[in-house]
Image: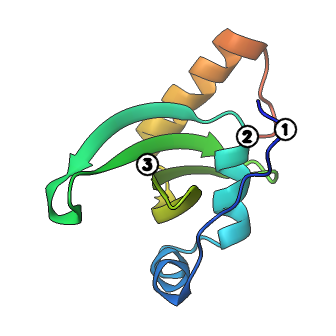
Amino acid sequence: MSDQALFFDWDETNKNHIARHGVTPNEAEEVFLGDPLDMELQIAGESEGEERLQQLGETASGRILQLVTTWRYGMVRVISAWEAPKQLKLYYLAEMRRRYGDTENSEV
């Protein structure tokens, strides 16, 4: 990773959106800055061809979340974030075990 600082683009719109899903900006940042699994890349037509990445990752407290992010003006913008469904949590835990060994503190 580069020595450059990574900045997040937060405003009331995306903060309120993830809050409706029970996620805080801090949790979303923890997932992004951790070791998330990149799941899917989409080009959002209604957003002038903006690339959006769907990721699956874990917070410091062991909560497993799905994120949709994009890059805007050199910053990471969290479009949405929510609690991952059980099937994806199990997939994530299996992948992390495969990569790193046991992940006993995670919440399923």
Name the residue that disc number 3 marks: 85
Q: In front of the other: label 3 or label 1?
A: 1
Nearest the viewer among 62 and 19 is 19
Q: Looking at the picture, does residue 19 appear above or below residue 8?
A: below
Other-residue count near label 3 (Cα within 10 Å), few / some / many at <14 / 14–19 / ≥20:
few
Res. 108 visible in picture: no
Pick whichever, 85 or 72, lies toward us. 72
- Please say if the residues under marks 2 and 1 sit with CB atoms less than 8 Å apart: no
Name the residue that disc number 1 marks. 3
Q: Look at the image and tell me in which quarter the C terminus lies.
A: top right
Q: Quick one: label 2 or label 3, which is nearer the N terminus?
A: 2
- Residue at the spot of label 2: 34
Q: Amino acid at mark 3?
A: Pro
Residue sitting nearer the eye, 74 or 65? 74
Q: Quadrant of residue 96?
A: top right
Query: x, y (%) of residue 101?
Result: 78, 13
* Three-letter code for the amino acid on which mark 1 is drawn: Asp
Mark 2, mark 3: which one is toward the viewer?
Answer: 2
What residue appears at the point 59 percent right and 59 percent down from the top-left corner? 75
